[in-house]
Structure formats: C-alpha cells, structure tokens
C-alpha cells in the first residue's frame, strides 16, 4: 500500500511535529510504502531546507517566499473584482479576510504541496495532509489499516475527504482542518488545481461567499468544503463515525515545559486548549 503524506504551511515546531508523526502516528510497517512531500513558506531560519529534509526524512521539499507568491496570486483577483459588479454583494470583511488574513497561506501551501506530489507521477493509494505543528492522537499501523479500509469502502462511488470532525453552525459546514485523509483519486480530484479553484471562488464564483456576510470568524473552516463544490467532493468526519480515535491538537511551546519526546498526547492537547482559551480572552 502506497501512502503519500503532504506537510504544508509555516515550518513552526518543525522538530516536534515531525518527531511525533514518525514516532507516534506513522503508518509504517511491512504493508506500507510511505513518501513525504513538503511545502514550506520560508521563515528565513538557517538551513531550513536541510532541517526539513532531516526531520521529515525526504528530499521532496519545496520552499517559497510567501509575500512574493501571494502578491502574484492575489493581483489578478483584486483586478477582476474591482470591475465586477457582483463584488458589492460580498461584504468587505469576507474578501478582506483572504486579502489580509495570514490563514490563506495554508490553502496555497496545500495546493503547492499537491503540485509537488502530482509531479512525481506516482499513483498512491492514500493521501494524508497535515501541518508542521499537528499532533495526532497516537495511532498504530493496524488502526491506520482499519481507517484506510473504511475510507476505501466509503468512496467506491464518490470522491470524499475525511477530516477529524465536521459540524454545522448557522447552516454553514465547519470542519477540522489540522489533518485529513483520502484516497489518492479523491485528493487529486479535490486538490489537483486547488490554488486555481481558490482564485475562481474569489472571482467568478464569489457569490458563493455571500453566505459568509455577517460571519466574522472561522472562515478558514468553511473555505475547505467550499473548495470542493466544483469537484463534487464530499467531506466526512472520522471521530464518532469510524472505529479510530482521531483526536488532534497542535504543538504550542509557550508556557509548556516538556520536550515532545517526554510528552503524552493528553498533556499536549490540554496545553493547547488552555492556550486557545487564553488567546480568546486576549490574555496572549
């Protein structure tokens, strides 16, 4: 079984995320052939490429300057919307979120990591997309096999992406985007031209975004399923729907006094939850 792992975004917590995946969550074993494809925005840290290669054990690494890439990508979007009469039906804060919000980088990085994957010409069985700082509840190779088989059976006749959680707020789909799993065929269908699909969503298809008028937060969680409309991609939760514990968290170093090697998942998860509460209260 061939598994491609895509890692994307800013290379924060590079060592911690890589160590945890390889030692706690990697579907390694006799039945798995696993390759990593890494896209990172350049954080100007020393020897970034070499450190990524060493930590994630791969030479499939692409590093781009976010500001340069984003400027070239965004300029035609702004030009198009400046002369499109329909732009007035989408509130400024919605399009402004994509223009000014740093979160748009994760979509672009995912698209570039997917391009790197597809350029290999290798047909994989499954694709795992994750972040540099994602911490997944420990999962062994047998549980991965259980999950892969369940996903295969669920997607015999449709394209689908499986995420940790999925719910609805005010009629809008919100999904957990720290990690996802899918068949290679479904991922290629969804993300094969992801950055182009995002550009189309913000221009020709922008009226789809009008439902976000009055929604000030969490646009990230809604954008992922919106990008699956044109490719007829479905999204399903893993937690509560499949026989695998797929809880997920992020590594946050501030205020945490243990190394990743000596940490347990519950400790990391609880610290992240406390960090999020403090941020919401404006204490951080």
Image (spheres, rainbow, N blue to C red):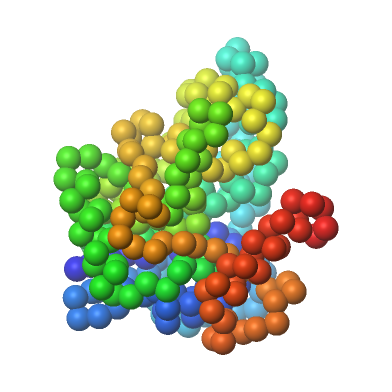
Residue at 45% across, 69% down:
137
Q: Position of residue 54 (x, y in %)?
A: 48, 82
Q: Is residue 240 left or right of residue 31?
A: right
Whether 204 is drawn above or below 27: the answer is: above
Residue 63 seen by the camera: no
Number of disc labels = 0
Q: Position of residue 192 (x, y in %)?
A: 35, 46
Farthest residue in the right direction? 283
Dividing the picture into quadrants, the one containing residue 189 is top left
Q: Is residue 220 left or right of residue 147?
A: right
Q: Position of residue 209 (x, y in %)?
A: 55, 26
Q: Position of residue 78 (x, y in %)?
A: 63, 30
Whether 1 is drawn above or below 64: the answer is: below
Whether 193 is drawn above or below 216: the answer is: below
Farthest residue in the bottom direction? 262
Residue at 74% across, 51% down:
280
State which quarter of the image contains the N terminus: bottom left
State which quarter of the image contains the C terminus: bottom right
Residue at 30% across, 44% down:
160
Residue at 72% across, 56% down:
277
Q: Is residue 197 left or right of residue 213?
A: left
Farthest residue in the top direction? 85
Name the residue nearer the viewer: 177 or 113: 177
Residue 55 seen by the camera: yes
């Amino acid at each position: 079984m061939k598994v491609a792992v895509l890692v994307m975004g800013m290379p924060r917590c590079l060592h911690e995320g890589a160590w945890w995946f390889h030692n706690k969550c990697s579907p390694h074993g006799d039945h798995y052939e696993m390759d990593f494809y890494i896209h990172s925005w350049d954080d100007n840290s020393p020897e970034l490429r070499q450190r990524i290669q060493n930590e994630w054990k791969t030479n499939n690494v692409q590093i781009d300057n976010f500001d340069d890439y984003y400027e070239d990508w965004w300029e035609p979007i702004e030009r198009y919307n400046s002369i499109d009469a329909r732009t007035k039906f989408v509130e400024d804060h919605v399009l402004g979120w994509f223009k000014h919000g740093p979160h748009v980088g994760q979509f672009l990085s995912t698209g570039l990591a997917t391009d790197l994957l597809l350029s290999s010409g290798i047909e994989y069985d499954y694709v795992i997309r994750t972040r540099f700082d994602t911490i997944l509840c420990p999962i062994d190779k047998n549980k991965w096999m259980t999950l892969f088989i369940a996903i295969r059976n669920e997607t015999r006749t449709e394209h689908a992406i499986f995420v940790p959680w999925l719910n609805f707020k005010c009629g809008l789909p919100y999904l957990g985007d720290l990690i996802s799993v899918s068949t290679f065929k479904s991922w290629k269908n969804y993300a094969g031209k992801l950055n182009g699909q995002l550009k189309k969503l913000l221009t020709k298809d922008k009226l789809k975004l009008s439902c976000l008028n009055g929604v000030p937060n969490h646009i990230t969680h809604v954008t992922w399923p919106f990008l699956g409309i044109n490719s007829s991609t479905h999204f399903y939760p893993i937690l509560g729907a499949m026989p695998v514990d797929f809880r997920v968290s992020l590594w946050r170093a501030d205020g945490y006094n243990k190394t990743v090697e000596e940490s347990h998942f519950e400790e990391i998860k609880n610290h992240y939850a406390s960090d999020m509460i403090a941020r919401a209260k404006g204490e951080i």
